Amino acid sequence: MENDRYYGIDVGGTTVKIGLVENGVLLDKWSVPTDISDGGKNILPDIMRSLPGPAAGAALAVPGAVLPDGTVNRCVNLGWGVCRPSEEFTALTGIPCRVQNDANAAALAEQRLGGGKGFESILFVALGTGVGAGVVLDGTIRNGARGAAGELGHLCLDPRDTAAACTCGHYGCVEQYASATGISRLAAQAGFPGMTSKQIVDAAAAGDAALEDVVDRACDALGRGIAGACAIIDPEAVVLGGGVAQAGDYFRLKVQAAFDRYCFHACLGTEIRLATLGSDAGMLGSALYAMG
Amino acid sequence: MENDRYYGIDVGGTTVKIGLVENGVLLDKWSVPTDISDGGKNILPDIMRSLPGPAAGAALAVPGAVLPDGTVNRCVNLGWGVCRPSEEFTALTGIPCRVQNDANAAALAEQRLGGGKGFESILFVALGTGVGAGVVLDGTIRNGARGAAGELGHLCLDPRDTAAACTCGHYGCVEQYASATGISRLAAQAGFPGMTSKQIVDAAAAGDAALEDVVDRACDALGRGIAGACAIIDPEAVVLGGGVAQAGDYFRLKVQAAFDRYCFHACLGTEIRLATLGSDAGMLGSALYAMG
């Protein structure tokens, strides 16, 4: 059994989601709280104690840039600096381990099993507190030379929009408009402070014209950013995930319309689809990545 | 001999450049004029008549989008509509033939033999009448699902800059600022009509402050576009080619500075290099592509 058993481990800022895959089937999944105290040094031991036994392999999906050699270049949300968590995991458990960026792992899961099923090359976009993204070409995750492939959230749309700096230190990034935080910020600018992105999108979908303008601005920015990414990699399809995308077709169709407005003419016809794996995507993708 | 002989054929709007490679060595190169009369129907026969004999393979580099199945989706400069020139070439010559976009072929040559030598993954940017680009990842050209990968020239930087429409029909594309045409347009806007991009860059390099402002604007736009592309694919290096880049380090350093201002922090350190193969890049790249 052990020869065909893999752990997919999505290490989030509050919860670690773990899945056990045997013979290609998800047999069990569970979670453990993420203990970010002491520089996150308890995270891997806590994961280890929750595992039911040995396995042929595992992969960690982490919220940070992963270099080609497996070095993780800081995970602020976990308290980790520059580290090599896959080696530490193997030292603790004896299980061979790989490491991948969480949005990239989710992209792989959505391409193989979710909203991108049937396509070999997709751009996956996760709309959460930030805008994460992952590039899968010919069925393979692209990390880039510095772990920065798929950083769609930091494609600069308008450097002159200096009202607020992005977390990256620049201005006018896609993330400043299309993340949950970005949508709330746009609503506050329009005179509706203190609303969550879900409240804003729900009110817009229910007919609030002023808030629909806010959502339109967010989708215009996101569609333009996706059009820019497609001018570089021209994937077969784009898959939208994350909390904001749970507004479903109301949101998706606005992004598709904006994409169609801005995309290079040869990219017209590229479909923007919804993700289907929800918050399991990172865990499932890391299991797939562990399997090679 | 014939078993190791390949033709690399760069089909440009005024000249077709042809190279003969045997045992991996460029033995000879020549050119024939491009006859675009009658929908470009004489182009392939003219090429055929110039070939010294049979070969194991050939590749055509063409100025248009190439779909994954080898269909060319219009080459306006050649008079070609939707066609399959590699099949026509093989029917005429008996030589197996592939087809590739010209900027993508040049990207492959620069990665293997030119400014990107030593890197497996590069973004190549060709500054000419337009802005062409090619993406090589792990030594392989990426065409994209619709032949639109590497269309950096049509990444939209500023949709509100509606002073002039891009050839693609949109506004504020990278090409509107950083192509030879774009630089001339920026100079005209600044009160210097009728200058070529070479005259503008040369005058700026010689100390003309007003024209240096124009070049700075072009390089700012190009650096921001390249930073956007690198946020998606994160190549090891960027290679700048085409006529405008012949201004050398004066131009390159300005693009590098703009890239460094706009790039995602993990991409800092990505070098912008100069192409070294000049106008042979497309011909050499198609020979490499013919060889597999």
Image (cartoon, coloured by chain):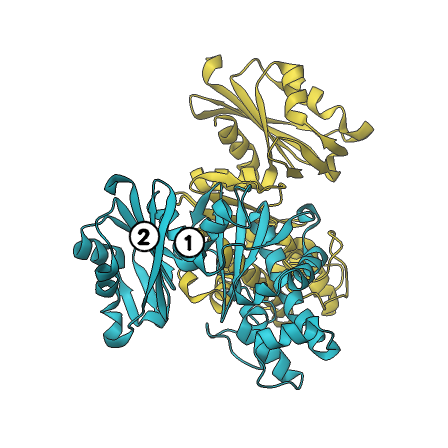
Chain colours: A cyan, B yellow
Name the residue nearer the viewer: B132 or A200: A200
Q: Mark 2 or mark 1: name the one nearer the start of the chain.
A: 2
Q: CA distance from mark 2 to mark 1?
A: 9 Å
Q: Which residue is mark 2?
A: A59
Cβ–Cβ under 8 Å for marks 2 and 1: yes
Q: Which residue is mark 1?
A: A105
In the rendered image, residues at marks 2 and 1 fall on the same chain: yes
Which quarter of the image is occupied by the C terminus of chain A? top left
Residue A63: x and y in percent read 38, 64
Secondary structure category for the residue under label 1: helix
Q: Is residue B180 left or right of residue A162?
A: right
Q: Is residue A67 left or right of residue A95?
A: right
Q: The residue under label 2 is which amino acid type? A: Ala
Q: The residue under label 1 is which amino acid type? A: Ala
Specify the subunit that label 2 lies on. Answer: A
Residue B93: quadrant of the picture: top right
Residue A64: x and y in percent read 38, 63
Residue A18 in sight here:
no
Q: Where is B73 relative to A17, above or below?
A: above
Q: Is residue A44 left or right of residue B102?
A: left
Secondary structure category for the residue under label 2: strand
Residue B203: x and y in percent read 62, 63
Residue B83: x and y in percent read 71, 29
Q: How many marks?
A: 2
Residue B148: quadrant of the picture: top right
